[in-house]
Amino acid sequence: METKDKMKYMKMAIEEARFGIRHKHGGPFGSVIVKDGEIVGYGHNCVLRDNDPTCHGEMMAIRDACCNLGTYDLSGCVLFTTGEPCHMCLCASMWANIEKIYYGCTIKDNGAIGFRDDKFDGIFGGRELLGDFLEPYGRRMCQKLFKEYLEQQHTIY
């Protein structure tokens, strides 16, 4: 995938996250799913809005893409997300057959703003076994989003 396309999709994931944090839906985590150059799913963290700990940005985008495509199989899709996925979202992406994930901020960045991803990553580990399935991209842009989140009144969960 070309750099300009990756930039475009990561910016869309950031805007999706920004919408969620401005409406107090949850943390600064937004995602888009792309297939054949088209956005097929959007999602942002809705844990607080829905009172549901599984409503992470990636999960919401997977649900949206599956609904839009009329399938549970997201083969050929690529996920862009503002934060490195937790194990729940990582495994859901694998179950959905997503072929690649580009993430902005790291697990450590997620922890630095108050989320427990690093705790669970320490328990489950194993990311080194995934090869190039996960690829960092756009960290600086996503760090600005995280800073914006920290400057707003927010609930840590």
Image (tube, rainbow, N blue to C red):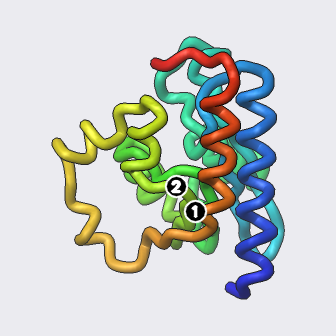
- Secondary structure of the residue carrying numbered label 1: helix
Closer-to-camera residue (140/136)? 140
x 80%, y 61%: residue: 39
Residue 70, placed above or below residue 150: below
Residue 70 appears in the rendering: no
96 left or right of 141 in image: left
Q: Amino acid at mark 2?
A: Cys
* Displayed quadrant of residue 139: bottom right
- Secondary structure of the residue carrying numbered label 2: strand
Q: How many marks?
A: 2
Closer-to-camera residue (142/85)? 142
Q: Which residue position is annotated with label 2?
A: 105
Q: Amino acid at mark 1?
A: Arg
- Residue 128 x %, y %: 25, 70
Closer-to-camera residue (90/13)? 13
- Residue 26 x %, y %: 62, 25
Q: Residue furthest bottom?
A: 2
Residue 152, placed above or below residue 109: above
x 26%, y 46%: residue: 121
* Disc 2 packing (10 Å; few <14; some 14–19; many ≥20): many
Residue 139 circle label? 1
* Displayed quadrant of residue 133: bottom left
* Mark 1 vs 2: CB contact within 8 A: yes
x 67%, y 28%: residue: 151
- Residue 69 x %, y %: 75, 55
Quarter of the image that includes the N terminus: bottom right
For the residues marked 1 and 2, what is the alpha-carbon distance in whole angstroms? Answer: 5 Å
- Mark 1 or mark 2: name the one nearer the start of the chain: 2
* Disc 1 packing (10 Å; few <14; some 14–19; many ≥20): some
